[in-house]
Amino acid sequence: MITFRTGLPALALSTVLLLAGFRVKPQTVLPQPAADTAPGSIFPKGERAPAANFTGTVYLYPLVKDDADFNCVSGSVTFAPGARSNWHTHAAGQILLITAGVGYYQEAGQPVRLLRKGEVIKARPGVKHWHGASPKQAMTHIALNVNTEKGVVTWLQPVTDQEYDSYE
Amino acid sequence: MITFRTGLPALALSTVLLLAGFRVKPQTVLPQPAADTAPGSIFPKGERAPAANFTGTVYLYPLVKDDADFNCVSGSVTFAPGARSNWHTHAAGQILLITAGVGYYQEAGQPVRLLRKGEVIKARPGVKHWHGASPKQAMTHIALNVNTEKGVVTWLQPVTDQEYDSYE
């Protein structure tokens, strides 16, 4: 289980939603759309996600920092075409709200399924899964981890090209 | 405390995010953009919210139904210009992700503040507050209630015109 609660360097803040739950207590969190916001997008795409946990180009923009009132961490994740997370599990599960583009989602032992803007996914606690963009279109989702006192994420192996290309 | 867990009639489902937490256990939740989706919007605007808890025209579109794995309920709420919620509190707090338009947010004893697309608000547990559109522009936000085992919402009195118009 990889769970940092305090002391993250500034650069690592952008990886919060998939990597870690850190606890602060702001009154409000006010991200402002930045220069890298694509036309029509809601949130900035943020900073590059750590290569160790992803294949391809992935950006993370933190939305909600964890704290003891909410036990919740959230961020907007943008996957370039072909990019995807490693396989991973969430001790308390994860909710994905697809906000743009077309993506893939797979739970271990299940076929790859297509994700489109407007869909909502619940990855149940402990269910091994991955998510990413489709081969030719980017995908952005809000990733939402609740009940973070139970843990946030455990990273596993990369998704192979064979697994990624198994969508039918 | 108004909290329904089971037995809601179908019509009431659209009010879930602000009214109630009901517990089901779907594998996945897959809302599809419907005909009433405005160009560029992520989610359908849903159905009319109950007049008893709002002033003006408000639509609710459920995104996440509560269940025992996540203790989380979420939906997209669209306020027509001038529309707003009643004053209310959340026993476990509420997070708002502003996805479109321009709105207002006020906590009791604080000035009204302006909300814009891309902002994130944390209404702390028990803090009396309201939210809505600005007078001339609609506002849509994702409303997110976590730790719903502690309760979801307690509705209070309507926001008066004097309170609503106090934004400077």
Image: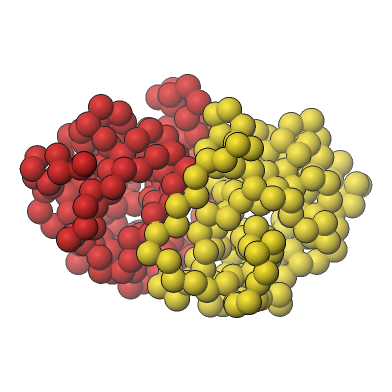
Chain colours: A yellow, B red
* Res. A21 image quadrant: bottom right
Q: Is residue A27 above or below residue B157?
A: below
Q: Quadrant of residue A123?
A: bottom right
Q: Nearer the viewer, residue B58 or A31?
A: A31
At horizontal 69% and vertical 61% (from top left) the residue drawn is: A11
Q: Residue at x 89, y 52 (%)?
A: A160
Q: Residue at x 44, y 39 (%)?
A: B117
Tell which of A18 and B30 is nearer to you: A18
The percent position of residue B88, horizontal first and vertical second, equals: 20, 58
Residue B164 pos. (x, y %): 15, 42
Which quadrant holds the C terminus of chain A? top right
Quadrant of the image containing the N terminus of chain A: bottom right
User: How many tags in the picture?
Assistant: 0
A6 lies left or right of B57 = right
| Residue A97, image x, y percentages | 55, 46
Residue B111 visible? The answer is: yes
